[in-house]
Image (cartoon, helix red, strand yellow):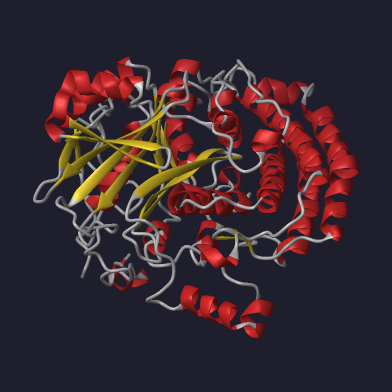
Amino acid sequence: MPLAPAAQYPIDADETPDHEYLYTLNFGPQHPATHTTLRLILTLDGETIVKAVPDIGYLHSGFEKLGEDLDYNQYVTIVDRMNYISPICNEIAWHHSVEKLMGLELTPRCKYIRTIIAELARISDHLLCVGAAALDLGGITAFLYAFNMREKIYNIFERMAGQRFHPSYTRVGGLMFDVDDGWVSLIRTFIKDEFPKAHTDVARLLNRNKIFIDRTKGVGVLTKEEAINRSASGPVARASGVVRDVRKEEPYLAYKDLDFQVICGTGGDCASRYLVRMGEMNESAKIISQAVENIPSGPINIDVEDKLTVPDKSSTYRSIEGLIQHFELFMWNRRWKPPVNECYGATEAPNGELGFYLVSDGDGKAYRAKTRPPSFIHFSLFPHLIEGHAIGDVPAVLGSLNIIAAELDR
Amino acid sequence: MTAWQTKLTETFGDACKFETFRDNIRCDVRTERFLEVMKNLRAQGFDLLLDVTGIDYLHYPKAADRYGVVYSLVNTESGERAYIKVRLNDPDPAVPSVYSIWKGCDWMERETYDMFGIVFEGHPDLRRILMPEEFTSFPLRKDYPLRGRGERHNFPTVLRSDG
């Protein structure tokens, strides 16, 4: 079908001769400070932003349509590519919703491993966000320290899943592989030595850095009422004083057994969001150090008898039951038979609440897989945050919101 | 029954039908009472609109209506969640916008419009958000094919000689 000719944009009614001194600046879609592909149309009065209109969709690739075509295990590879800064959190969110729909209770070992990797991903996400926020404001050293530490986290993911960037590690009712002792010792070294050092380095470089504070304090202020009314979640909402964390309110995985605090701020500005993220990294490290010493033994997948998990290769090749079940889950007309119903499962991703609204028609693939993407919601706050500020504050606000365009556009 | 369910039943009678699955409490609301129900819920403390989900029930087993729109609400004080659902039908699926209650619905409703063609009456700026402005279909409807209708191969090409 051919496309209709592009609609002519109507000339803005505000553009009367009185407003002729206003001019329009196109920011992005390719701009170093956006980090990913997003575009802003800024109306400026000198250096001051009068109006900001985000224009998104450059990376839209129909993830949700694919989610209706791929089965519950296959879609995890697509979900990985949403927030590619912390892919593991997307996987966990996806399978959390799927398991809620099917009514599965995970094994304790699986819960702990998932908790550990989710928190590692949170550290890795916050490190990048904090580092990139500093980079955009001219502090390249902090970025290098932070980015270096992300490599160590990738090494841990590689050891566990064989893939560094997009591990696709979770499966319905469990995980792809079990972890080994080497993985545990990698995490121990990371939490005891490597991470605290990097965290201190970044904190020392930025916390009392006059330039950084001047550029972030009082910039992009989001009040508590506005944060709730405009649907903010995660660190962005918590920096505005909204005490809400899915890990505490509806504890999933192993969060109930672990001791940690919800970090909140009151400023609601970019500096406050930065400090909340720095604090959350410490809490994540605390969670990991508790969880990694207490990983229960036992299987990682739920019982094979439930006929919901993919059996491991040895039982597929060596036993008739395993072989049958393998076929049952991979043949197009068999697979899972979830209840004909719909449900929403929420997790606390590094950026905010990440959930999937799943509608099932009883088939092996979702009838509708709606993502609740935190980046999408947070970017809709952007015009509200930036209006009245100078153009130099755009990178500061963008950096503090941590917009990931792949999750924004899906 | 939770307190908000009781209150909704008292106020709206059979315009609200409840269903519980896992820990989700879903409330099916008749379209004409929808905005009143949402205002009532806001007054009861559901101050956070988490998500707006569009669903096309074209091939869904035993579905009577074509579209569903689900609003996920959270009470930030008590942590309760509520899922409010309206059902819509062709030829003009339309539902009042909740922009007057939650400003956060802005982009969520635009996305639902973009993907399903559901019109949110009273939305201040209902344009396409993810798909290009000149796109003519609604891609997440079930009658839209997975591989599209050839739009990718028919992008208008600007040649140097045209300049």
Whether residue A357 is visible to the viewer of this picture, yes or no, is: yes
Front one among A179 and A327: A327
Mark count: 0
A155 horizontally vs A332: left or right? right
Name which quarter of the figure residue A25 lies in.
top left
Name which quarter of the figure residue A297 lies in.
bottom right
Quarter of the picture containing the C terminus of chain A is bottom left
Q: Is residue A341 above or below residue A252?
A: below
Quarter of the picture containing the N terminus of chain A is bottom left
Q: Is residue A155 above or below residue A114?
A: below
The image shows residue B155 at horizontal and vertical percentages of 31, 67
Whether residue A49 is visible to the viewer of this picture, yes or no, is: no
A82 horizontally vs B131: left or right? right
Determine the residue positioned at 42% across, 44% down: A344
Q: Is residue A34 above or below residue A3?
A: above
Determine the residue positioned at 56% across, 20% down: A240
The image shows residue A23 at horizontal and vertical percentages of 40, 32
The image shows residue B159 at horizontal and vertical percentages of 34, 70
Name which quarter of the figure residue A352 lies in.
top right
Determine the residue positioned at 68% across, 41% down: A132
Q: Is residue A238 above or below residue A288?
A: above
B59 horizontally vs A399: left or right? left
The image shows residue A231 at horizontal and vertical percentages of 43, 29
